[in-house]
Image: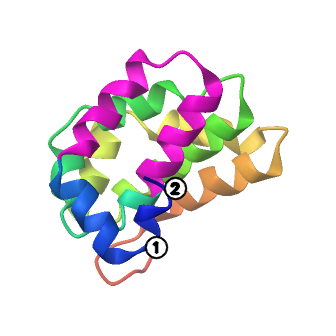
Amino acid sequence: MIAIAEYTYGVDQIIHLGILPVLIDKLVEEKIEVIMILILSLLKVLMEGEMAPMVIQSSDALGRLNSHLTSPEYKIRELSAMNLGSISYNQIGKEQAIDAGSIAPLCKMLSDKVSEVRTAATRALNSLAQNKEGKV
């Protein structure tokens, strides 16, 4: 699916097939780290789809992503922060991320030992801080 999602038409078709809710459920159910990384990578790509914000914002994705911000696996922390940043692209997503308590764990990630995790957390916090005009 990641290969299919490289194309805009592929992203839209995967979203149309109802895969996003399945992936969001897998954020709780999946215990194998390698598979979790693939799920989070696919979610990141699918966030670019036109219908993705509506599906994501009407789900439990934020709380589930928040729970992975403290994962022992750095790639899971990084991808979770990147996905939170994508969700908070629009005003509704910003408000929901704030209400879900995403700011405190993202701030803690600013002192992570892995630079990619710190960068992802910084970008997510920046996305939360920007207003409609893209200004902080």
Check the image and report above or below for 86 versus 96. Answer: below
Q: Nearer the viewer, residue 125 or 69?
A: 69
Q: How many marks?
A: 2
**Please, what secondary structure does the residue beneath circle 2 have?**
helix
Q: Nearer the viewer, residue 22 or 97?
A: 22
The image shows residue 35 at horizontal and vertical percentages of 56, 30
Question: Does the magenta run of residues contain 20?
Answer: yes
Q: Amino acid at mark 1?
A: Val
Q: Can you see residue 47?
A: yes
Taking the view exactly as shown, the residue that stands out farthest to the bottom is 133
* Pointer 2 residue: 124
Measured as percent of width and height from the top left, residue 16 is found at 16, 57
Q: In x, y percent, where is residue 78?
A: 64, 45
Give the residues in magenta.
Answer: 18-44
SS for dot 1: loop
Question: Mark on residue 35?
Answer: none
The disc labelled 2 sits on which kind of residue? Answer: Ala
Residue 23, located in which quarter of the rendered image?
A: top left
Q: Nearer the viewer, mark 2 or mark 1?
A: 2
Which secondary structure type mostly characterizes the magenta part of the structure?
A: helix
Q: Which mark is residue 136?
A: 1
Q: What's the CA distance linking mark 2 and mark 1?
A: 13 Å
Q: Image quarter for residue 91?
A: bottom left
Residue positioned 34% across, 43% down in the render = 98
Residue 104 belongs to magenta span: no
Q: Residue at x 53, y 49 (%)?
A: 41
- Identify the residue at image location x=33%, y=67%: 10
Asked whether, in this view, residue 79 is left or right of residue 21, the answer is right
Q: Mark 2 or 1 closer to N-term? A: 2
Q: In the shown orientation, is residue 53 left or right of residue 107?
A: left
